[in-house]
Amino acid sequence: MLVTGSTGFIGSRLVPTLRARGHDVAALTRDAAGYEGDADTVYEGDVLEAGSFEHALERVDAAYYLVHSLGADDFRQKDRRAARNFRRAASDADVERVVYLSGLGDEDEDEEEDLSEHLESRREVERILAAGTFDLTTLRAAIIIGEGNESFRIVRQLAGRLPLMVTPRWVRNGCQPIAVDDVVAYLAGVLETPATASNVYEVGGPEALTYGSLLERTAEVMGHSVLVVPVPVLTPRLSAYWVELVTDVPEEVVRPLVEGLQNEVTADDVAIRAVLPTALTPYRSAIGRALEEDGDGPSVAERATAKLGEITVGRA
């Protein structure tokens, strides 16, 4: 199988998980010479450039699409072009399954225009990929708790740097973060579960929170407290300026992510839990692991593989 975005936050953790499950894994990267991951085969190419990556899809049964251009000035146009290139190439190569990691947001078509540009781009990529000849499985997630995720980086830095936060109203919005271990387990698990083909699943952690309570829990795990005071006068643009001032996350990444905080992103995960009944990671454990991910404990891939092993045993 092929993993695009193989050097990214999710892809770099998914590749060793798939290999631990006995799969033959190929990685697609824009710099094959600099690849330091665990894939069996490494291909160089860029889905933004038609003609540069199609060779990687030869003899591939399934592929993961983990590409997102967030941070580029024209990220939505790039997302669209990349998805169309990949859809055409995967269809031409007779790939059977594609798995895509998307974002949570209101699914009501009448209200879809209210999604942030970032989330709407994710949803547009879903629609583009769904028109391919392969079976598409889509997982939709909100904030993924793990070292390297930009949304969690914002949460961690806000919680760690400010004992008092005068915050925008979006801190009261609902969210349902999920541990990176659980996302990786779900991504690997759906490919091994034929019933998930051509379905869309929402995935989330063990409970719905508000952004404010997520900030407070993160601060607690870091060993201190934080007082969150919402005020009505901070617009999305002012919110972005505020986050840029307090964190070191690049401006071009902060703005679309902060706009996305205006949307409620809680998950209806009944369907995915029915086919992959894994034990979800408690938030304090997920946050603690994210803060210590470079330590000597088990890796994300090892924990995700253990979760999948428990599901396999249960089915047997």
Image: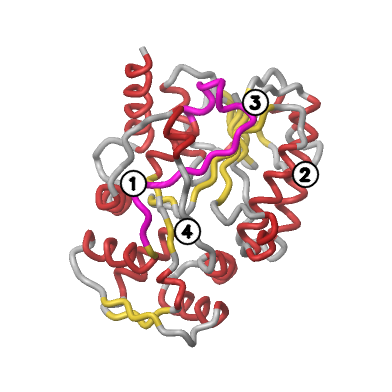
Q: For the residues carrying marks 2 and 4, which lies nearer the camera in this image?
A: 4
Label ID, residue 49: 2
Q: Is residue 89 left or right of residue 142?
A: right
Q: Which mark is residue 150?
A: 4
Quadrant, the C terminus: top left
Q: Earlier in the sequence, mark 4 or mark 1?
A: 4
Q: Of marks 2 and 4, which one's residue comes earlier in the chain?
A: 2
Which picture quadrant has residue 31? top right
Q: Is residue 94 left or right of residue 247?
A: right
Contact between marks 1 and 3 (CB within 8 A): the answer is no
Residue 129 pos. (x, y %):
72, 39
Residue in the image at 61% along x and 57% along y: 119
What is the x, y in percent for residue 140? 54, 45
Give the residues in magenta: 188-209
User: Which mark identifies residue 206?
Assistant: 1
Could you say which is closer to the camera, residue 127 or residue 63? 127
Q: Identify residue type, mark 4.
A: Glu
Instruction: Estimate the spatial distance between the alpha carbons at disc 4 and disc 1, rounded to whole Å.
Output: 21 Å
Mark 2 Cα within 10 Å, few/some/many (few <14, many 20+)?
Answer: few
Q: Is residue 106 above or below residue 49?
A: below
Image spot of residue 270 (x, y percent): 45, 38
Circle 3: residue type: Arg
* Residue at disc 3, secondary structure: strand
